Image (cartoon, helix red, strand yellow):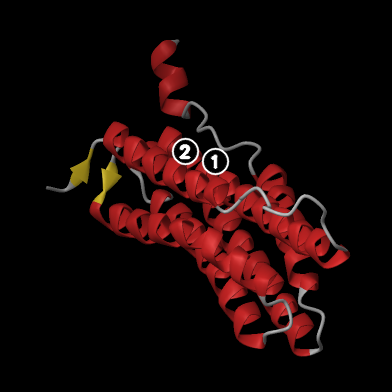
């Protein structure tokens, strides 16, 4: 089996994302106390912040996966391997976010959180590099070059954000990485997502004429 139906891959991706989003909701429990102390409010703020971080990252990874699905002519086995790795990492996003929100001063928590987010970005970039070999995209070399450049820049930015997050944790500013992960993925995705659609090749134009 050299390739897999894109529809089945998309359905699998949607299912994993739905489960990860459900896990996020299960973490939001109604407090039993009628009156909340300041520490309780701070705890709930951290929980909600963890929910926001997780939801944003899950959304960005889902959009990235479906953007690739829309451009590919088929889903090859190398792409399938990267996809399974990506889906496994997506399922860990709620854990990583909850961990750093529950233990914000713990260096191991910051390393785990940043590693999960970083690995998700790298998998998305690898998927883009593999997709650049797709015959449908290769019909327009400019699109393939753009796709490779986009994927490399994407991975570089994820590496940079992860390093800044780890440095912040080392110097007792763990939420520096959280803030970056909150903002950077969306900025990167919207900045680099333009011009993904393959354009008609010159041969196609000549044929049409």
Q: Can residue 72 be seen in this view?
A: no
Residue to which mark 2 is pinned: 66
- Left or right for 34, reference 95: right
Residue 175 in the image: x percent, y percent?
78, 71
Discs 2, 1 touching: Cβ within 8 Å: yes
Which of the 4 quarters of the picture holds residue 43? bottom right
Residue 36 in the image: x percent, y percent?
82, 56
Q: What element carries label 2?
A: helix
Q: Is mark 1 on a helix, strand or loop?
A: helix
**Crowding at label 2, few (<14), some or many (≥20) Cα neighbours within 10 Å?**
some
Q: Quadrant of the C terminus?
A: top left
Residue to which mark 1 is pinned: 63
In this rendered view, identify the residue nearer to me: 93 or 157: 93
Q: Residue furthest front?
A: 34
Q: Is residue 172 visible?
A: yes
Residue 157's place in the image compared with 188, above or below, is below
Residue 104's place in the image compared with 22, above or below, is below
Residue 42 in the image: x percent, y percent?
82, 63
């Amino acid at each position: 089996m050299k390739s897999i139906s894109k529809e089945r891959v998309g359905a699998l991706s949607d299912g994993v994302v739905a489960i990860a989003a459900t896990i996020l909701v299960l973490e939001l429990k109604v407090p039993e106390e009628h009156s909340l102390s300041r520490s309780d409010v701070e705890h709930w703020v951290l929980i909600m912040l963890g929910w926001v971080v997780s939801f944003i990252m899950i959304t960005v990874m889902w959009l990235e996966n479906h953007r690739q699905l829309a451009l590919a002519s088929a889903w090859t086995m190398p792409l399938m391997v990267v996809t399974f790795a990506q889906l496994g990492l997506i399922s860990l996003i709620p854990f990583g976010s909850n961990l750093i929100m529950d233990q914000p001063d713990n260096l191991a928590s910051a390393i785990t959180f940043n590693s999960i987010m970083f690995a998700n970005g790298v998998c998305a970039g690898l998927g883009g590099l593999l997709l650049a070999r797709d015959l449908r995209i290769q019909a327009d070399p400019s699109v393939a070059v753009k796709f490779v450049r986009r994927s490399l820049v994407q991975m570089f930015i994820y590496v940079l954000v992860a390093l800044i997050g780890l440095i912040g944790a080392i110097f007792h500013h763990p939420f520096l990485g959280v803030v970056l992960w909150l903002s950077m993925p969306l900025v990167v995705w919207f900045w680099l997502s333009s011009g993904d659609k393959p354009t008609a090749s010159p041969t196609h134009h000549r044929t049409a004429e």
